[in-house]
């Protein structure tokens, strides 16, 4: 199968071209970040039993890194307002397991 490029207009009004394989979603549950004078480096990994895959590396100009940090902060505030404030430790547990624990707790509370 041959991967083709797709062109889409960004919000800035200029075309962006990407390989289809590069825009497919990838799961990551671990990130390592570092910086140099001219760039920030974000390495994303998928880790688990028998799995330790490097899934992506992103290089950001410091100005873009600051904008990303500001956008993430705003999104986290909206997330907390919608779902309740979460600590980083609580968020380390996958969502499915947290949901199962909540259901289990309700069943115990209701006597089921």
Image (cartoon, rainbow, N blue to C red):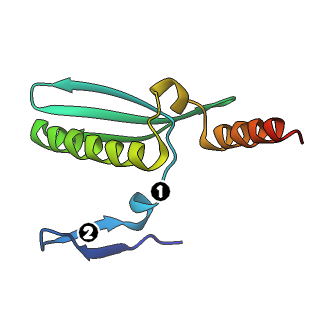
Structural crowding at the residue carrying mark 1, measured as other residues with C-alpha within 10 Å and reported as few (<14), some (14–19) or many (≥20): few
Quadrant the C terminus occupies? top right
Picture quadrant where residue 32 is located? top left
Structural crowding at the residue carrying mark 2, measured as other residues with C-alpha within 10 Å and reported as few (<14), some (14–19) or many (≥20): few
Q: Position of residue 12 (x, y in %)?
A: 12, 68
Give the residue drawn at x 35%, y 42%: 76
Labelled disc at residue 17: 2
> Horizontally, is 27 left or right of 95 in the view?
left
Give the residue drawn at x 61%, y 38%: 94
Query: Which numbered disc, 2 or 1, marks the residue closer to the eye?
Result: 1
Q: Is residue 15 above or below residue 57?
A: below
> Horizontally, is 24 left or right of 52 in the view?
left
- For label 1, the residue is 25
Looking at the image, which is closer to me, 28 or 21? 28
Looking at the image, which is closer to me, 13 or 6? 13
Q: Position of residue 20 (x, y in %)?
A: 41, 67
Q: Residue furthest front?
A: 110
Labelled disc at residue 85: none
Q: Is residue 66 above or below residue 17?
A: above
Residue at disc 1, secondary structure: loop
Q: Position of residue 74 (x, y in %)?
A: 26, 45
> Horizontally, is 86 left or right of 59 in the view?
right
Q: Position of residue 63 (x, y in %)?
A: 10, 40
């Amino acid at each position: 199968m041959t991967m083709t490029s797709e062109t889409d207009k960004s919000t800035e009004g200029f075309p962006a071209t990407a390989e289809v394989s590069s825009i497919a979603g990838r799961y990551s549950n671990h990130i390592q970040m570092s910086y140099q004078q001219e760039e920030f480096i974000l390495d994303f990994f998928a880790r688990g039993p028998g799995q330790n895959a490097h899934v992506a590396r992103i290089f950001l100009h410091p100005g873009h890194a600051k904008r990303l940090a500001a956008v993430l902060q705003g999104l986290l505030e909206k997330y907390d307002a919608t779902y309740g404030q979460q600590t980083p430790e609580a968020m380390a547990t996958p969502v499915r397991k947290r949901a199962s624990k909540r259901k289990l707790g309700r069943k115990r509370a209701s006597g089921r």
